[in-house]
């Protein structure tokens, strides 16, 4: 699994929540879920005074970083009034060349809240979908008419540039990125740890199977869900799962239905179908290989199960929407 480098680029008057929200998401993915994420902080000043009054320092100098493919430069929001007065113009000019070079080298760019103003000022949002805090929308549209503003969106993605709306939507965007990189289960576990919704504005079909992980319930049930979601290709019997949970098969079966509303077999089937849905996006994988990776006895069994669930053949690759 390739490492993801997250670089927070901080500007004067940065908002702490815009920094702390996504940072905590990536922190939990690394520490709780053991995903290969490295987080670094940089700025073109030796110290940044946050809008809330906290001084931030000890950054890695930008010239010591070489962001490229696999990297994400995350720009938290800044004080809107200070930006309008031109107080950040010098900082933007200092960072512009470095950010553009990183983007040309394959790095992704991510703004939280009013951070989109900084990307727009650099010309990086021209002809791209983007959003911003609701207070900044009119200003953004008037001063940067080349952008494709998505006023009703909580977050957007367009050619490796991600933007999010008001402050806490940086968490939603970070969870979305985790889902893209490591799968929905990792995003759901992090959301549960942070006690937030799985991800707002998500219309993906896996929402139902993962969203109940955020509910407090019996730890043994959660443990079995982890096993089934992490190993959908394995054919665990009820007896094997019961031993993992240190419960009798009958007790586990009763608890699982009580706390999830599903039987273990129903949950296992949903987990396999969701994995298959993700794998089918890779056109290099044949139906037989997808079936094997998802734990089906044969491609024929997989085709029949998929057709029963979605009414179309898996060769279409997508659930009709």
Image (cartoon, grey):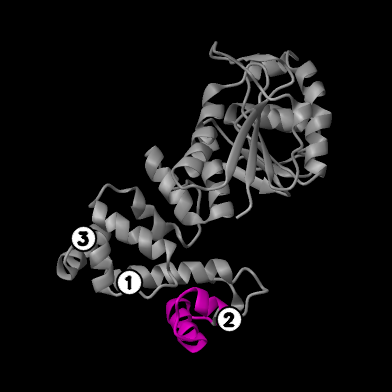
User: Which residue occupies 67% across, 73% down?
Assistant: 283
Q: Is residue 112 magenta?
A: no
Give SS at disc 3.
Answer: loop
Q: In this rendering, which labeled residue sits more in front, label 3 or label 2?
A: 3
Image position, residue 249 (x, y; %) = 19, 70
- Whether residue 143 is visible, yes or no, is no
Find disc 3 in the rendering and name its residue. Answer: 246
Task: Identify the element where label 1 is drawn.
Answer: helix
Residue 270 screen position, x and y as percent:
40, 69
Pinpoint residue 201: horizontal percent, then vertical percent: 50, 48
Spatial CA span between label 3 and label 2: 36 Å
* Mark 2: few/some/many CA within 10 Å (<14, 14-19, 20+): many
Disc 2 from disc 1: Cα separation = 22 Å
Q: Earlier in the sequence, mark 3 or mark 1?
A: 3
Magenta residues (range): 288-312
Mark nearest the camera among 2 and 1 is 2
Pick the front one: 97 or 245: 245
Disc on the earlier residue, 3 or 2: 3
User: In the shown orientation, is residue 123 left or right of residue 281?
Assistant: right
Q: CA distance from mark 3 to mark 1?
A: 21 Å
For the residue pair 265 and 92, the one nearer the viewer reads as 265
* Disc sitting over residue 287 in the figure: 2
Circle 3/circle 1 CB separation < 8 Å: no
Looking at the image, residue 170 lies above or below residue 298: above
Query: Relative to the observer, which residue lies in front, 63 or 114?
Result: 63
* Circle number at residue 266: 1
Q: Is residue 78 above or below residue 105?
A: above
Residue 191 shows in the view: yes
- Residue drawn at point x = 59 percent, y = 74 percent: 317
Circle 3 residues within 10 Å: few <14, some 14–19, many ≥20: few
């Amino acid at each position: 699994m390739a490492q993801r480098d997250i670089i927070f680029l901080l500007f004067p008057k940065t908002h702490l929540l815009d920094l702390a929200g996504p940072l905590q998401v990536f922190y939990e993915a690394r520490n709780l879920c053991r995903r290969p994420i490295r987080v670094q902080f940089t700025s073109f000043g030796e110290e940044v005074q946050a809008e809330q009054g906290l001084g931030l320092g000890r950054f890695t100098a930008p010239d010591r970083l070489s962001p490229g493919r696999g990297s994400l430069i995350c720009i938290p929001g800044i004080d809107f009034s200070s930006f309008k007065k031109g107080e950040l113009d010098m900082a933007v000019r200092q960072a512009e060349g470095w950010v553009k070079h990183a983007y040309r080298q394959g790095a992704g760019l991510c703004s939280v809240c009013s951070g989109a103003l900084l990307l727009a000022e650099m010309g990086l949002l021209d002809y791209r979908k983007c959003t911003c805090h609701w207070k900044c929308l009119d200003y953004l549209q008037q001063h940067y008419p080349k952008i494709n503003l998505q006023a009703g969106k909580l977050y957007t993605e367009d050619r490796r540039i991600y933007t999010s709306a008001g402050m806490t939507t940086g968490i939603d965007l970070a969870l979305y990125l985790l889902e893209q990189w490591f799968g929905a289960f990792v995003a759901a576990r992090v959301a549960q740890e942070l006690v937030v919704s799985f991800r707002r504005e998500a219309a993906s079909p896996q929402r139902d199977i993962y969203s109940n992980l955020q509910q407090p319930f019996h730890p043994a049930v959660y443990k079995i869900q982890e096993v089934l979601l992490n190993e959908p290709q394995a054919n665990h019997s009820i007896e094997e799962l019961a031993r993992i949970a240190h419960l009798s098969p009958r007790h586990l079966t009763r608890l699982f239905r009580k706390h999830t509303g599903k039987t273990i077999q129903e949950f296992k089937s949903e987990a396999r179908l969701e994995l298959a849905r993700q794998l089918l996006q890779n056109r290099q994988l044949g139906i037989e290989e997808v079936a094997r990776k998802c734990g089906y006895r044969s491609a024929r069994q997989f085709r029949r199960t998929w057709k029963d669930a979605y009414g179309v053949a898996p060769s279409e690759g997508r659930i009709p929407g």
